Amino acid sequence: MACPHRFENQLVPVWEIEHLFIGTFNPSWNLNNAVQADYFYGRIRNNFWCIMPIIFGGNNLKYSDFATKLEYIQTHKIGITDLITEVINAQIENEIDVLNLTTRFSDNVLNRYQLEFNTEKIKKLIMRNIKTIKGVYLTRSTLNGINQIANNWREIEKFCEENKIHTERLKTPANYGGGCVLKSTDWLNKIIR
């Protein structure tokens, strides 16, 4: 059985958006004995929900429930999605696949698999919001060693460029390489320019 996205029914926001944040993937398979993400960027070691209020106003949402996060992004016209919808050739019966997608999770590991992408739906989402969208952001600053992901992001970048929409690659919100405040400075400089 392939590994679908944890939020496969929420990959295309239905509200009006001004800012679209694009990640890579959140596996539906559960990590044993761990708290699972309740929404995009919902793992405790991720700073996304701490960074958002620094940029768009409000209180830290890192420990907030799903309903509070959803209300915040709808109010602030923020969309969140991921590039990958499914890891096609991963098998839940295969211990290595489970470890790769739940504990050793990295985009470099993902790149070794056959992936299904959300690129066309993302482009349709952008077009649906063409009158309001101010920017499209990949929550990853480097694309080295991840050619499948890089190629799909570049397709979105090109599409945005053709439609005169600002794009940026942001420092990962993961909890390494600087905390919430340091990363929010990078994000602010690229989003609120």
Image: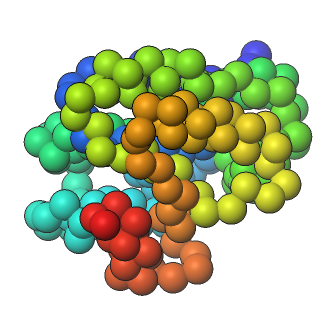
Whether residue 40 is visible, yes or no, is no
Give the image location of residue 159, x and y in percent: 54, 31
Give the image location of residue 74, x and y in percent: 17, 37
Q: Quadrant of residue 115?
A: top right
Foreground residue among 55 and 7? 55
191 left or right of 169?
left
Colour convention of the picture: rainbow
Give the image location of residue 57, x and y in percent: 14, 64
Identified at 31% across, 66% down, the residue is 193
Picture quarter with the N terminus: top right
Whether residue 4 is visible, yes or no, is yes
Foreground residue among 14 and 123? 123
Q: Quadrant of residue 56?
A: bottom left
Q: Quadrant of residue 83?
A: top right
Q: Is residue 192 above or below residue 153?
A: below
Identified at 43% across, 32% down, the residue is 163
Give the image location of residue 19, x and y in percent: 31, 45
Foreground residue among 177 and 159? 159
47 left or right of 17?
right
Foreground residue among 100 and 155? 155
